[in-house]
Amino acid sequence: MSEPAVVLLSGGLDSATVAALAARGGFDIHALSFRYGQRHALELDAAAKVAAHVGAVEHRIVDIDLRSFGGSALTGDIPVPKGRSVDALADIPVTYVPARNTIFLSFALAFAEVLGSSDVFIGVNALDYSGYPDCRPEFLAAFEVMARLATKAGVEGTQHLRILAPLVDMTKADIIRTARGVGVDFAMTLSCYDPAADGGACGSCDACQLRARGFTEAGIADPTRYAAGTP
Amino acid sequence: MSEPAVVLLSGGLDSATVAALAARGGFDIHALSFRYGQRHALELDAAAKVAAHVGAVEHRIVDIDLRSFGGSALTGDIPVPKGRSVDALADIPVTYVPARNTIFLSFALAFAEVLGSSDVFIGVNALDYSGYPDCRPEFLAAFEVMARLATKAGVEGTQHLRILAPLVDMTKADIIRTARGVGVDFAMTLSCYDPAADGGACGSCDACQLRARGFTEAGIADPTRYAAGTP
């Protein structure tokens, strides 16, 4: 019998790759997404397609309202930066959402405990995107330590939470090569922070630029559908 | 100028006491409550009264759906235990909600970051209620370590999150004495897990029993309004 695992699924390329890796690893996938006041719900449609594609047992979408705090270009009224250089992303960008991964992982922890699972997969990546503090290995390690003290199952010894972040040290090109190896359908995924209403990617936000460069560096044709008029 | 602090407010006696302590400490109080699928919304009414009473700058109520995972008598369809002995609460009770305080503190972390605050107050107590893993000092300490790695403000050095849990080592009688000292209006607070529709306490759930015993031990008259017919 295979083990259940919670897979955080955003609908982007990275989490789709992680979901495919978890499926290859023989886990029963319980996909978890959030409707968190993001600018567009298109990524939830992408997440649903990816969940079905990897044969997830279920796909839960939890409503949480991160807009009530604001503080981010992804949930508030700060514009998404376009066309800036992604070669020097030293500063934490305005697309950072306060404590987002802490909140997402906390819900994953609750879900895992109810499922009787110790494995939570997350598609974070520290290398190409060092700007987000909650994508770094030291954050994930500290979350694991905290989580083992947080739950009934942890205290009773039936849950030893592992945060599995197989992409954490990969470049975007590595991720894209890995994704191809495990059968990710790139066209299903949506990485753009600010897509058009029809789901076309903007081509100029940080996420679009990093993704496009990853395809180039990996030497793999980029099937991303860009919005009409994108250069 | 006073410093902002996030105060997690449930509407119960403990969080009301913490809110009053924070107010005495000179903090600007940003109260935070959750509509999380609990059995009754009466506690949110109590929280609103307490927030006003302590002069909170604001009171945010965030909607999150913990019912979607189940696993608890407080959010699911497991009955709330009544009339059992509270002298030997060695086992974690069915009123435990998976990862609840981890989730609440994660939202508080996000709110604190947006406010530019490093102080989060929570009314947990490990002594009278050792059953809940996420009420213990070792959990809170691990959360602080994680939180300092999680946020933009933490990484940039402007936020050094402190989880302030002034009641963590107190007995219920200590808490009640402290509460009286800082002017908590006990009649405003609601501790019961299963109140009647009119807000009367059931008198027999664990929370009611611990509260009633606390008043007796503190030698303070108990102004709790019990539901009609409660023995």
Image (tube, coloured by chain):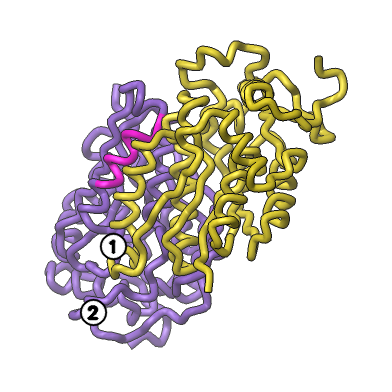
Chain colours: A purple, B yellow
User: Which region shows up in magenta?
Assistant: A142-151
Q: Residue at x 47, y 27 (%)?
A: B127
The residue that disc 2 covers is A86
Position of residue B208 measured from the top left corner of the image (x, y, whole percent) = 68, 25
Q: Residue at x 23, y 59 (%)?
A: A125
Q: Are marks 1 and 2 on the same chain?
A: yes
> What secondary structure do most residues of the magenta stretch adopt?
helix
Q: Helix, strand, or loop for circle 1?
A: helix
Name the image quarter holding residue A223.
bottom left
Q: For residue A11, which numbered disc appears in the image?
A: none
Q: Residue at x 12, y 72 (%)?
A: A217
The residue that disc 1 covers is A133
Disc 2 residue type (three-letter): Val
The residue closer to the viewer here, A78 or A178, is A78
- Residue B17 vs A230, above or below: the answer is above
Position of residue B103 measured from the top left corner of the image (x, y, whole percent) = 47, 45
User: Mark 2, chain letter?
Assistant: A
Q: Residue at x 64, y 27 (%)?
A: B218
Mark yes or no: residue A210 visible: yes
User: Mark 1, chain letter?
Assistant: A
